[in-house]
Amino acid sequence: MEFNAVVLAGGRATRLGGVPKPSLTYDGATLLSHALQASSGAAAVVVVGPYGPGNVPASQEGFLRAREEPPFAGPAAAIAAGLAALRDRVLPCPWTLVLACDMPHAARGVGALWAALKMHPEVDGAMAVSVDGRKQPLLGVYSTAALERKVAEASSGSGLTDSSVFRLLARLNLLDVDVPAGATDDVDTWEDATALGIDYDLEADVKSQEETLEEWCRTLLQAFELEGVEVDVNEVLAVAGVAAHSVVRPAAPLTTFIAGYAAGMARGIGQASDDASMNAALDLARKVAKEYAETGTDAE
């Protein structure tokens, strides 16, 4: 049976402290790698989610990438983004495997789904059911045409942002397929990760981020011929964090840009030194952001 695959690898991972699930390691490979392995046999695979340089192993390149709109809009929106990417860039297949990347043993269940569909090809798809009876729509194979139809209906109605996948699939004629034990076990918390034997070197990741940011800062300063300027990266990020939480997330880069511009203007006209100008600008940006949060309006 010919199929494409949509692997969901986004989400905020709030209960994991924001640590991206695709980068967690199980049995020597990332969860994303395990999901891609579970999708083997697909004519094309699209991975929906955010990516940085370290999120995707070089050995796992070659798949399509997409992002739900708006970002973090939920799995239903991510499925729609994956379908759109496949529709635009590859030949269609009659079936679509939908798979969340946080189930390291999902491959155990994929075969059971295909076996059920071969016996009942007239249905709209098959959804995994765990040993304890819980349905898992993010381990399922669905008719591409039926899935596209439901996405179109939802998009023209209430939309897909923060919508339930169960709601998206509610009117489809689906098989409930019992899958082997552990196939649908997922990672929502660190307790889940520990129970599954999943590793993550938080200290190494933090160090890597810090080193990358310091290197990027030096690169930018060199590009702007500002090698002699000292930038307190942690302080800039702290102000960005205040703006993101006090206003909206996109306010973070906007705030730091304007603060930096103001500091440069002050330094240019001789009001203060580089350090004093930057510190004053960041302090003012932090103050205004906090006042905005308290009043809900522009601070005067």
Image (tube, grey):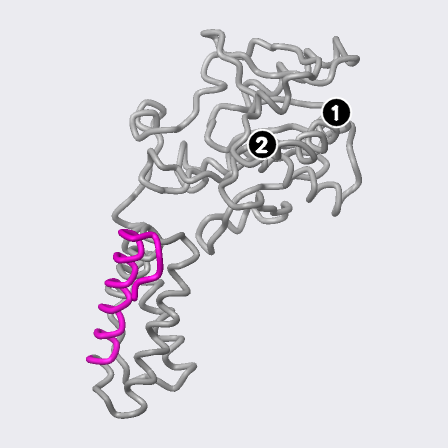
Q: Measuring 41% from the left and 83% from the top, which residue is drawn there?
A: 224
Q: Position of residue 145 (x, y in %)?
A: 77, 28
What secondary structure is the stretch in magenta mostly built from? Answer: helix
Residue 298 falls inside the magenta stretch: yes
> Looking at numbered disc 2 in the image, what kind of residue is underneath it?
Ala
- Neighbourhood count class around disc 1 (C-alpha, 10 Å): few under 14, some 14–19, many 20 upward: some
Q: Measuring 69% from the left and 18% from the top, which residue is drawn there?
A: 125
Choose between 73 and 195: the one closer to the eye. Answer: 73
Give the magenta range. Answer: 276-300
Left or right of 6 in this view: 54: left
Left or right of 48 in this view: 272: left
For mark 2, what is the residue? 76
> Looking at numbered disc 1 in the image, what kind of residue is underneath it?
Ala
Q: Is residue 43 above or below residue 59?
A: above
Q: Position of residue 150 (x, y in %)?
A: 70, 27
Q: Is residue 92 above or below residue 282?
A: above
Quadrant of the frame with the C terminus: bottom left
For mark 1, what is the residue? 146
Give the distance between the C-alpha atoms of the residues marked 1 and 2, in whole angstroms: 14 Å
Q: Position of residue 6 (x, y in %)?
A: 62, 35
Find residue 39 and name its label.
none
Residue at the far bottom in the pictured view: 270
Q: Earlier in the sequence, mark 1 or mark 2?
A: 2
Q: Is residue 34 above or below residue 242?
A: above
Q: Is residue 78 above or below residue 53?
A: above
Q: Where is residue 138, by image quadrant?
A: top right
Left or right of 62 in this view: 242: left
Q: Where is residue 254, by image quadrant?
A: bottom left
Q: Measuring 28% from the left and 61% from the top, which residue is drawn there?
A: 239
Residue 192 falls inside the magenta stretch: no
